[in-house]
Amino acid sequence: MRPRDVNLLATAAVSASLIFVPLWADKLHASTEQLGFIVAAYNGAVLVASYGFGRAADVHGSRRILQAGLALGALAAFLQIFAQDPISALLTRTFLGFCVGMYPPALLAYAHSADRVMGNFVAWGSLGWAAGTFLAGLSDRIAPGDTTPVFLVSSLLFLAALAVSSGARTGAKATIPVPLFPVDLIRRNLALYLTMLIRHTGANM
């Protein structure tokens, strides 16, 4: 398994459904404020899962967490099809956000030990964003105004990433001792973390 291939497929899965969230929420009669809550809940779930499962991947190994995140991501993306109102949209997007937060830290941990060419790994993720957006546009071209094909594409891409990840070595386990709240690590890299925080805040406005 090449981690970059999983990164490509999983990132495409995320971006495919992400681009249509505002239109989907409007179709479900969500107000602007409710849309904000839906997006905030998704990102909050990503944050919580990334922190918890990122540490778990470092301490216990990445393979099972990676595959669990991808499998649950496929389920969560599929469940978006059945949302009927803003509340169910909030629940399905929060669930998907939790799944999306599970696999990237585990994938990064695995890529660091298995791929090592991190520049290529990141580049394939960027290609995944472009591919997912293209497939979403193609789906809307085929079925204008219907988000069901988009969510199906997203779910299938997660499943494809899961299939590729089955080739991950079972013995690849990290043994990095990570405290529950790494104060020293945060202090040393605070400037980098703040830079990323500002960048992502601007990108999500």
Image (spheres, rainbow, N blue to C red):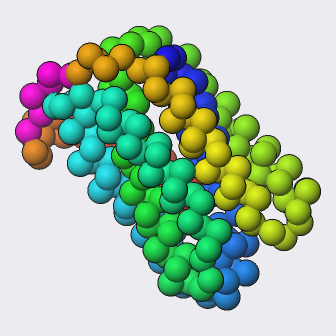
**Secondary structure mainly formed by the magenta segment:** loop
Q: Residue at x 54, y 31 (%)?
A: 163
Residue 177 placement: quadrant: top left
Q: Is residue 150 above or below residue 23?
A: above
Spot occupied by residue 160 in the image (x, y as percentages of width and height): 60, 35
Q: Residue at x 88, y 63 (%)?
A: 143
Q: Is residue 3 left or right of residue 124?
A: left
Please say whether residue 87 is visible from this viewpoint.
yes
Residue 125 placement: quadrant: top right
Spot occupied by residue 130 in the image (x, y as percentages of width and height): 72, 38
The residue segment tinted magenta is 174-179
Q: Residue at x 26, y 16 (%)?
A: 171
Q: Is residue 78 left or right of residue 200?
A: right
Q: Nearest the camera: 71 or 116?
A: 71
How many marks overall?
Answer: 0
Q: Is residue 191 above or below residue 18?
A: above
Q: Is residue 177 magenta?
A: yes
Q: Is residue 45 above or below residue 4?
A: below
Q: Is residue 117 left or right of residue 203?
A: left
Please say whether residue 126 is visible from this viewpoint.
no
Q: Is residue 145 left or right of residue 38?
A: right
Spot occupied by residue 39 in the image (x, y as percentages of width and height): 51, 68
Q: Is residue 76 magenta?
A: no
Q: Quadrant of the C terminus?
A: bottom right
Q: Residue at x 51, y 66 (%)?
A: 93
Spot occupied by residue 88 in the image (x, y as percentages of width and height): 52, 80
Q: Is residue 140 above or below residue 81?
A: above
